[in-house]
Image: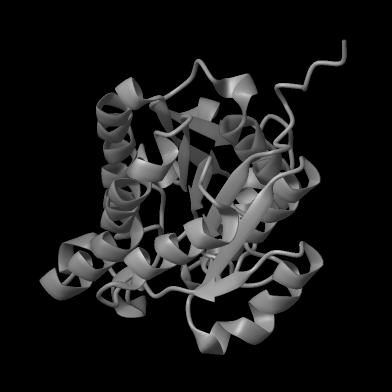
Amino acid sequence: MNLPSPFSLAGKRGLILGLANEHSIAGGCARAAHALGAQLVLSCLNERSLPYAAPVAAALDAPLLCCDVEQAGALERLVRQAVAQLGGLDFVIHSIAWAPLAELQGRVADSSSAGFLRAMQVSCHSFAELARLCEPHLRVRGGALLTMSYLGADEAVPHYGIMGPVKAALESLVRYLAAELGPQGIRVHAISPGPVPTRAASGLSEFGALMQRACREAPLRRLVSLAEIGQLAGFLAGDAASGMTGQTIYVDGGYHVLG
């Protein structure tokens, strides 16, 4: 008898948020999930993003919807439309992070209350809201909620600024959601990639130097690829990771072990 592979996503239905273009982490996750057999719905920020995100979605035969999490009701509409398209959900990947440029490139000590709150709302609380909205659909047969973090959540990385405290809050949120949703069979993880040249990362000061340091010092002596990040997401979304929840899992060439 040919049993289905636990590493396959055949028959799984996924929603992936945060597609900007072919070079975004959400794009890498979408390509990996599609290759593993998943049916997908993707989201991008707004209509201005569509020309850049649409080719990625079209190549994967996946519907593409707009969702600005700062707009009231946007996440509710997205989840409702995704469930209508797919007939349910088995995994959700949250790949959204943003902070005002002045806050991102300045000192944490100088951050404004308004800028800090916006960064927290977009990058962290939107994951909690997404979990609440997806919970009724994921608990039908269990599933996974995944989000994206970075080493700057755990240690002070030069020039990462305000996003360090925000990502630290996100990783804590993952643990609390895992504890709350685990009894319903819903698993929650943060993926922590090494630096990759995405549009979002381009707003960080000295990002090129950060990538060079990772290449020079990481045990594998290189950056990770979008495909490698996507493969980890595909594993965590599937049945092969059914006994895991509440973790921050690094895919960074081993850089995090240097402390």
> Tell me, what colour scheme is on the image?
one colour
Is residue 69 at all visible to an observer of this figure? yes
Place of residue 252 in the rendered image (x, y in percent of width and height, measured from the top left): 61, 38
Image quadrant of residue 101?
bottom left
Q: Is residue 117 above or below residue 250?
A: below
Task: Write the residue at 34% across / 43% down.
Answer: 136
Q: Is residue 52 above or below residue 83?
A: below
Is residue 223 at all visible to an observer of this figure? no
Place of residue 50 in the rendered image (x, y in percent of width and height, measured from the top left): 61, 83
Task: Write the residue at 33% across / 65% down.
Answer: 76
Q: Residue furthest top?
A: 1
Left or right of 85 on screen, residue 226: right
Task: Write the residue at 64% across / 35% down.
Answer: 232
Q: Is residue 153 above or below residue 133?
A: above
Left or right of 70 on screen, residue 219: right
Near-viewer residue (230 or 41): 41
Q: Residue furthest right?
A: 1
Place of residue 120 in the rendered image (x, y in percent of width and height, measured from the top left): 25, 60
Place of residue 240 in the rendered image (x, y in percent of width and height, measured from the top left): 64, 21
Near-viewer residue (32 or 207): 32
Q: How many marks?
A: 0
Q: Is residue 245 above or below residue 75?
A: above
Image quarter where the N terminus lies is: top right
Q: Residue furthest bottom?
A: 48
Image quadrant of residue 199?
bottom right
Q: Residue furthest left?
A: 113
Near-viewer residue (44 or 195): 44
Task: Write the residue at 64% across / 63% down.
Answer: 197
Left or right of 14 on screen, residue 126: left
